[in-house]
Amino acid sequence: MANVCVQDHGRAAPALSLDDERTRARVTPSASDRQFGALELRDRLEKAIARLPANYRLLVAAHYLNGVQYEDLAEALALPLGTVKTQLHRAKQQLRRMWKRTYDDRFKVQGSGFRARSLQNR
């Protein structure tokens, strides 16, 4: 394709370096591409959460998606605080294993505003 364009215009196409900031700016994904990537990532994460056992799914949804505090979860579920924390930790571990097994490094979204690793940091 580049050769056809060069022949049509009668001049050589300038060489572009991928290390050049100006070139990188031209090939950066658009905002709509990043938004779509973030939506796809969120969809995949929701599917992984749906595969968790019911007790883990409830805790993950309440704490990480709805912001319910550990203490409030423990009181509402009549569980010791340590049990809530332990079950959330195990749920995150299980999610990580499922994610790695299913998506590994094939699905990464840069600059999407939503990070799969956000569950690891709590």
Image (cartoon, rainbow, N blue to C red):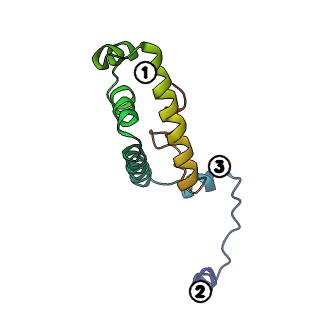
Query: Which kind of residue does numbered mark 3 sit on?
Result: Glu
Give me the residue at 36% from left, 16% from top.
74
Give me the residue at 42% from left, 49% from top.
31
Q: Which element carries disc 2, helix, strand or loop?
A: helix
Residue 103 is at least partly visible in this image: no
Within 10 Å of the Cα at label 1, are there few (<14), some (14-19), or many (20+) other Cα atoms? many
Within 10 Å of the Cα at label 3, are there few (<14), some (14-19), or many (20+) other Cα atoms? few
Residue 81 falls in which quadrant of the image?
top left
Query: Which kind of residue does numbered mark 1 sit on?
Result: Val
- Pinpoint residue 32: horizontal percent, then vertical percent: 39, 53
Q: Is residue 28 above or below residue 64?
A: below
For the residues labelled 1 and 3, the Cα–Cα distance comes to: 48 Å
Q: Which element carries disc 3, helix, strand or loop?
A: helix
Q: Tell me which numbered mark, 1 or 2, is placed earlier along the sequence.
A: 2
Give me the residue at 55% from left, 50% from top.
108
For the residues labelled 2 and 3, the Cα–Cα distance comes to: 27 Å
Give me the residue at 47% from left, 34% from top.
91
Which residue bears the numbered disc 3? 21
The mark closer to the camera, 1 or 2, is 1
Residue 114 falls in which quadrant of the image?
top left
Which residue bears the numbered disc 1? 84
Q: Tell me which numbered mark, 1 or 3, is placed earlier along the sequence.
A: 3
Q: Are marks 1 and 2 in contact (CB under 8 Å)?
A: no
- Pinpoint residue 73: horizontal percent, then vertical percent: 34, 19
For the residues labelled 1 and 2, the Cα–Cα distance comes to: 64 Å
The mark closer to the camera, 1 or 3, is 1
Which residue bears the numbered disc 2? 4
